[in-house]
Image: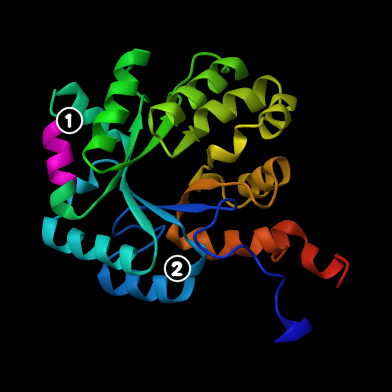
Amino acid sequence: MGSFALPPREEKPRSRGLTAVIDFGPDSMGWNVEGALSGFLDLVGGYVDYAKIYALNALLLPAEPLKRIVTLYRDADVSAYAGGILFEYAWRRQAVDEMLDHLESLGLRSLEISENYITLEEDTRRRLIEKARQRGFKVIYEFGRKNPEAPFALDDLQALVLSSLDAGAEHVIVEQSELDAVRRSDPSRLDTLAAASWFEHVWIEADPYAFPQQHVELLTTFGREANLANIPTGQALRLEGFRRGVGRAVDYRLLSEEVG
């Protein structure tokens, strides 16, 4: 449409500006059952790169409908993955192999390995990432606790990011609660994080309940092409608008930007 078209964004598969939605299932933040999800993906799938199956929903939901949901995501070029709480549940029960078998049976070929409520030694973490990779799974590692006792040190995060990537993880998510702790302590440290050479491999986790203010703040701090995770399907289209300068929350920045 020439000059009337919106400014372009990188097409999928994207290397930056990734949006990872969180699929809560039937929920007020996105009624993610087959029919509704199919319609959502027809309209918004081009702006969604990954979809996390929330917490223990891979066990709570019936297998057959969940298989069809995973297929809908795959057909829309969206990579569905199991959330880290499922991994932590399996780890606590020494059932990681059984978890991988179950995910495989659902058609899920990606998973998140996290330490929200467990603690892994570095060798163990690397071994688990490598194990999943050898089974043919893509791995996303999530850094951070749900209830951190102190703000993280950037050197510690860097070491963990680089170690996880070296073991075979494709991306590293920074837990939203960890970012909140840093923001309360010293917000300028977030600018240092954004400038790190390894930041391109990091996803920033947002708080669905702090939408839209926090999401706009994240885009302001980390840039419009920041990789954002934990976005409910009901917020994904508006987030895409914010990236482009559309919406009251960003003061319709698109209208004041230079044309051409």
Q: Quadrant of residue 84?
A: top left
Q: Residues within 10 Å of mark 2 (few under 14, many from 20)?
A: many
Please name the colour scheme applied to the rendered image.
rainbow
What percent of the width, then of the height, locates residue 101?
Answer: 12, 42
Q: Nearer the viewer, residue 132 or 237?
A: 132
**Pointer 2: what residue?**
45
Q: Residues within 10 Å of mark 1 (few under 14, many from 20)?
A: some
What percent of the width, then of the height, locates residue 3?
Answer: 78, 82
- Determine whether 206 is above or below 21 in the image: above
Q: Nearer the viewer, residue 140 or 211?
A: 140
Residue 146 visible in the picture: no
Q: Nearer the viewer, residue 237 or 48?
A: 48
Instruction: Classify residue 232 as left or right of residue 137.
Output: right
Hey, what amino acid is under mark 2?
A: Gly
- Determine whether 133 is above or below 61 in the image: above
What percent of the width, then of the height, locates residue 51?
Answer: 38, 54
Q: Residue at x 71, y 80 (%)?
A: 5
Instruction: Classify residue 158 as left or right of residue 167.
Output: right
94 inside magenta stretch: no
**What separation in Å lies between label 1 and label 2 (alpha carbons)?**
31 Å
What percent of the width, then of the height, locates residue 135?
Answer: 21, 39
- Determine whether 125 is above or below 85 in the image: above
Q: Residue at x 20, y 47 (%)?
A: 58
Hey, what amino acid is under mark 1?
A: Val
Residue range highlighted in magenta: 96-103
Quadrant of the frame with the N terminus: bottom right
Quadrant of the frame with the C terminus: bottom right
Q: Residue at x 58, y 29 (%)?
A: 180
